[in-house]
Amino acid sequence: MKQRNIGSDSVSAIGLGLMGMSEFYGAADRAQSIGVIHHALDHGVNLLDTADMYGSGHNEELLGEALRGRRDQAFVATKFGVVRGPGGSFDGIDGRPEYVRKQAEGSLRRLGIDTIDLYYQHRVDPDTPIEETVGEMSRLVEEGKVRYLGMSEAAPATIRRAQAVHPISALQTEYSLWTRDPEAELLALTAELGITFVAYSPLGRGFLSGAIKSIDDLAEDDFRRGNERFQGENFQKNLELVAEVEAMAGSKGVTSAQLALAWILAKAPHVIPIPGTRKIRRLDENRAAAKVELTAAEVGHLDDVLPFGATAGLRYPEYAMATLNL
Ligand SMILES: NC(=O)c1ccc[n+]([C@@H]2O[C@H](COP(=O)([O-])OP(=O)(O)OC[C@H]3O[C@@H](n4cnc5c(N)ncnc54)[C@H](OP(=O)(O)O)[C@@H]3O)[C@@H](O)[C@H]2O)c1
């Protein structure tokens, strides 16, 4: 597996997102999910991405079970900040120091580990100065509970303020052929500050793979049904964009998912995509994308057929857009 860097660690150039193993994208099978995590570790995909809020703790417990006896093979990244209430309700964003500490301790317990490799603030809390949140995160580093700090969906000015308190090692933000917003500022800023850019939803929540051709391909309770990009006319327009990816993938002899991941890897050496899957065959397909080389002309062609703003629909429903620090 090719490697990229987070802090002074070497990690797999393509990670594995675990979110769908607990929530959002339909039902998941626990034993199968653990099998996928083990298969990832067997093949050197060691950057494993979870969060306290995925399944309200379920996802971290699942990872904890999968890591038993294998902790040393994994680079564990988790997050705090999105508050879940009883029954799974979404109860806002919290970045207060006491909440940071409580969540970190809960994550360590659920994961069954002594140290979190990378601890992200999942969403910036508009009511807590970032200096206070990162200040508490830095104390977790001093105490050996956390190794590296990260932020997610944070704006450039917030990242600079955070970095003044403690080095930020990773920024995790949505980035893919259909969400090219980070190219405006964040990719250059993170490169300048020595921050790894972790690209989440790199397959456009599965859409860019070409596997989703109709809304009926999604379960009734699938979170994507509430996303404009998967609705009505937008869905049809976005399928036309995917047809461009499929055409190029076909002529190159790779899959659309591989092409979408290779495009991200080609964009900059400090970017790491973390596709999510619950299936071993797709994990194998996705990790093989690290070997797909794109010429500058091929990258340019994809840039041209899926330019910024081409995707129809917002990347999140309005209520979730409001939690982004833009
Ligand atoms: N920081 C944040 O706010 C944030 C937000 C969202 C996600 N994330 C993280 O980023 C990770 C990845 O993002 P994501 O899961 O939202 O989206 P994604 O990786 O773009 O897409 C995942 C979806 O694509 C499907 N898929 C995966 N590989 C495929 C392939 N080769 N061919 C066809 N379909 C494929 C998966 O289905 P199957 O599972 O059925 O294979 C799943 O439905 C998450 O797991 C999570 O850790 C972070």
Image: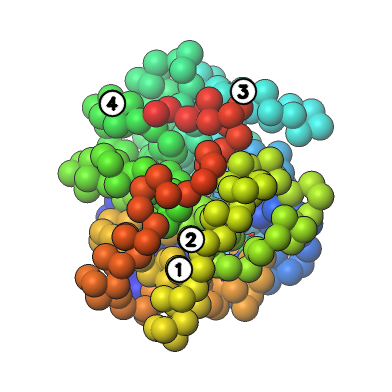
Please identify the quarter of the rendering in which residue 284 is found: bottom right
> Which residue matches tag 1?
244
User: Mark 3 against mark 1, which lies toward the viewer?
Assistant: 1
> Which residue matches tag 3?
92
Q: Are marks 4 and 1 in contact (CB under 8 Å)?
A: no
Residue type at mark 2 is Leu
Quadrant containing ligand 1: bottom right
Residue at 28% x, 26% y is 157
Q: Nearer the viewer, residue 173 or 250?
A: 250
**From the viewer's perspective, is 322 left or right of 109?**
left
- N-term mark: 3 or 4: 3
Q: Tell me the SS state at disc 2.
A: helix
**From the viewer's perspective, is 310 left or right of 284?**
left
Q: Is mark 1 within 8 Å of ligand 1?
A: no
> Which residue matches tag 2?
241
Q: Tell me the SS state at disc 4.
A: helix
Residue type at mark 4 is Ala
**From the viewer's perspective, is 217 left or right of 140?**
right
Q: Are marks 3 and 1 in contact (CB under 8 Å)?
A: no
Q: Looking at the picture, how far across and down is residue 16, in whole percent?
A: 53, 62
Q: Looking at the picture, how far across and down is residue 192, in whole percent?
A: 18, 44
Depicted 318 relative to depicted 126: above or below: below
Distance of label 1 from label 2 (alpha carbons): 5 Å
- N-term mark: 4 or 1: 4
- N-term mark: 3 or 2: 3
